[in-house]
Image: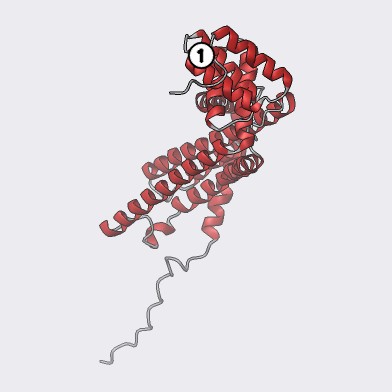
Amino acid sequence: MRARNRSPSRPAAASGPGRPALPELGRAAAALGICLVLWPAWEWSGADEAYRRAVVGLAERIVLARQHFPLLSGFPRLAPPNADFVVLFALGLTAASIRVGWRRRLVLLLVALGVTSGLQTAAAVASINLESAQEMERTHRILVLLPTEFQLVNQAKLTLYHSQLAVLFALFLLTSPWLSELNIGRETRPGKRRRAILGAALGAAVLLGASIAWGRWRESDARHVAAHAKVGHLFWAKRDDGIAEEQYRIAAAGNTVDPEVYFNLAGISAQRGLFKDAARLLRRCAELGTDAAWQARVARAFDRIGAPRRPESP
């Protein structure tokens, strides 16, 4: 018998990177639809306002704990840009990614929300610093942020807000079934892991070094030193000698040319019985305050502490 000619079988449907992008577009559309459905309930329940208050409250605590100039005790009503869409779209994208295991989706959602909240909090911190710097310059002529610092903080704020879109894009990729087909996201080899850790450590060291160098440069800038002196005067007028002295010491370490800084520091030292230190500060005040009014004030101060205007020879 003759063998029957069998027609060649049809090739299996292509899978992997060459598959049409239509399913992924459908997943994105479904995520957007879920986001729009959740939006009224999100606002009606008050979750939107509670979320914003939590972000702003955390930002305020960070600013109060780490502010360089002790000027802020409270804040105006800060209203960060509405970022609810990022949270709701992340929820919708997690719900629409049904081809990925629910545990993986839940972990990725929590990570995405954590990163988003961190970005929003950091942006709120930048907003508070910018607004307070503008207010202090307008009302007290205190340059809290140097012009370069102001531009950098403002750019950082915009970058932090826009980075939330990158979080959504990363979440979209990580919840895609293409990852398993492209072998993305699997555990790396030990050598690659070590190189990644080394690179992260090196980057952190570079950032730390740059931060320290920037801080030292800033503290030596005459405008920043003058700001410390003005903050000291502000608290001296309020009779808060503790903060005033702290700011005066920083200004003196930066070689301020404000004679009042040394005069007031001399008064603090004299109150503590440190007359040699007071005399040294008064001599520096006399070097800077060369007009007759300052010379008369310094002379009276020397008479009160009973010290000679010229240092005694050893």
Q: Amino acid at mark 1?
A: Ser
Residue 289: tell me if it is visible: yes
- Snapshot quadrant of residue 180: bottom left
Task: Say whether residue 101 is left or right of residue 139.
Answer: left
Assign the N terminus to one quadrant of the image.
bottom left
Q: Give the camera-side residue of 225 and 160.
A: 225
Dot 1: element: helix
Q: Residue furthest bottom?
A: 2
- Residue 259, position in %: x, y? 64, 24
- Residue 228, position in %: x, y? 60, 27
Residue found at x 69% / y 19%: 294
> In the rendered image, which residue does mark 1 sit on?
269
Tally of marks:
1
Residue 40: tell me if it is visible: no
- Residue 173, position in %: x, y? 47, 53
- Residue 226, position in %: x, y? 63, 30
Assign the C terminus to one quadrant of the image.
top left
Q: Residue furthest front?
A: 313
Q: How is the image coloured?
A: secondary structure
Q: Give the camera-side residue of 121 and 299.
A: 299
Task: Say whether residue 4 is left or right of residue 256.
Answer: left
Residue found at x 51% / y 14%: 269
Q: Say few, some or many: other residues with alpha carbon within 10 Å of mark 1 (under 14 / 14 to 19 / 20 or more).
A: some
Q: Give the camera-side residue of 297 and 247.
A: 297
- Snapshot quadrant of residue 84: top right
Q: Give the camera-side residue of 206 and 105.
A: 206
Residue found at x 64% / y 10%: 300
